[in-house]
Image: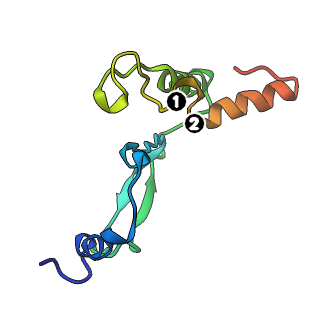
Amino acid sequence: WYPPQHLMQAFSNNRRRFMSSDEDRVVPVDFFWGLGGMDVRGVDKYDPVQRGELVLDTSFDASSPEAQTFLKQVCVDVKTSPCDAPGCGGAGSSLVRNGVAGKVVCPMQGFASWLAMNSFSFV
């Protein structure tokens, strides 16, 4: 009963084409800093190709030692955070699937590694 161009109608039309797996319960989460929002003026909300324009937060500055240390620590905290909810695996589980071996992409940790390889110190 949705309009033909509506996302839910497209999902309904195609849902039987895809098999499900245990991975379907895993939700990727991305953290971003320095974003002010999305300008969606003139965007058709039923057209997934139209996304709008990203608006940057001009007050964001990751150049200070405090900001860099914070951004690096966020990755450590996310990777080591416990999660006892059933969706995480229950008591003793971690927020990141596969615990500390799980995939967490952290540009600031990569930057710190690059500095170390080039004989510089991180902050």
Per the rendering, the mark at residue 60 is none
Q: Residues within 10 Å of mark 2 (few under 14, many from 20)?
A: few
Asked which quadrant contains residue 20, the reply is bottom left
72 with respect to 94 (left or right): right
Instruction: Pick the residue in front: 76 or 56.
Output: 76
Instruction: Pick the residue in front: 5 or 38.
Output: 5
Residue 122 in view in this figure:
yes
Q: Are marks 2 and 1 in contact (CB under 8 Å)?
A: yes
Percent x, y of residue 99: 52, 25
Image point (48%, 26%), residue name: 78
Q: Secondary structure at mark 2?
A: loop
64 with respect to 28 (left or right): right
Residue extending furthest toward the left: 1
Q: CA distance from mark 2 to mark 1?
A: 8 Å
Per the rendering, the mark at residue 103 is 2
Residue that numbered label 1 is attached to: 98
Quadrant including the C terminus? top right
Position above or below: 85 against 14? above
Instruction: Report the amino acid beneath label 2.
Output: Lys
Q: Residues within 10 Å of mark 1 (few under 14, many from 20)?
A: few
Image point (47%, 42%), residue name: 32
Percent x, y of residue 48: 36, 71
Instruction: Pick the residue in front: 13 or 6.
Output: 13
24 with respect to 100 (left or right): left
Residue 51 in view in this figure:
no
Q: Secondary structure at mark 1?
A: loop
